[in-house]
Amino acid sequence: MKEEEIRKVVREGYARIARQDSNPCCAPTTSCCGGTDLARDISRNVGYTEEELEAVPEGANLGLGCGNPVALASLQEGDIVLDLGSGAGFDCFLAANRVGERGRVIGVDMTQEMLEKARENARRAEYGNVEFRLGEIENLPLADDSVDVVISNCVINLSPDKKRVFAETFRVLRPGGRLMVSDIVLLKELPDFIKDSIEAYIGCLSGAMMKDIYVGTIQSAGFRDVRIMDETLFPIDLMVNDPTAAAIIEKQELPLEELNEVAGSVISIKVHAVKPNGTA
């Protein structure tokens, strides 16, 4: 698929999720659909605490993550935080609680339906230190050197131009600023029929990079101290129960041994990096 086609497919897929027509997700759990209770279960499984789940507005958590970048971002009071692909605002609201009134959180998302949902959540819960902007993560609507921390949760793998995403992230971070992302990467290449699958792209599979290339792309953007803080294999039941994966399995009539092989090549990682001080 061409870049614009990929963006269109992803935008439409996540617009459906925002409207609650369907719920493909990236989270390693036994099911990815079924409403608020399962969204909470998904979030617990990828590292969110009960306290965090209770601290955000109802409807902000759609169960779309593959990790908890806020937990590892070492957010401080007064920080300015950017969330790439902010969705309904889940991580933004958690970050807002940490940075306090002196801080600010900016969520960027390319799906208008998600932005509307996030803005409504912020309005209802009276979050004055959070804003949501329409934009693509390859072309961030922010000034150079304007944020202290960039977080992202299972979103960069959806981009057809990850090199550009990390270059843009580097641009908007202040010298000394931190990057903390949770994402899906590969230990070995996926079969072509998955790479070419629209369902797999929305479900965060076919857009995923090899792990070493992903880390190398961050380093090539100029980041230093690039470290994988944690990595977790995707369990086989994700492939069976995620509706996007189920569509692929049904369409391709995958035998169990092939399914196991595919699932064993997909992992969730949490990556930390720093923009060097003194970089213009």
Image (cartoon, grey):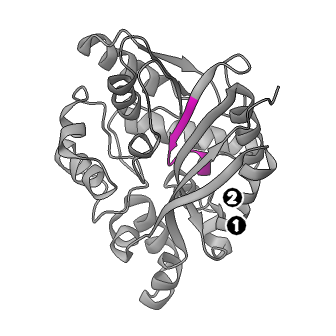
Q: Which residues are magenta?
A: 149-157
Q: Residue at x 44, y 65 (%)?
A: 245
On the picture, is 34 further left or further right than 276? left
Task: Name the kind of residue labelled 1 in the image.
Answer: Asp
Q: Is residue 254 visible?
A: no
- Residue nearer the viewer, 187 or 20: 187
Secondary structure beneath dot 2 equals helix
Which mark identifies residue 212? 1
Q: Is residue 76 visible?
A: yes
Secondary structure beneath dot 1 equals helix
Residue 40 in the magenta stretch? The answer is no
Which mark identifies residue 215? 2
On the picture, is 149 further left or further right than 224? left
Q: Residue at x 61, y 61 (%)?
A: 206
As displayed, is residue 68 above or below residue 277?
below
- Residue nearer the viewer, 99 or 199: 99
Which residue in the rendered view is the most extreme toward the bottom? 257
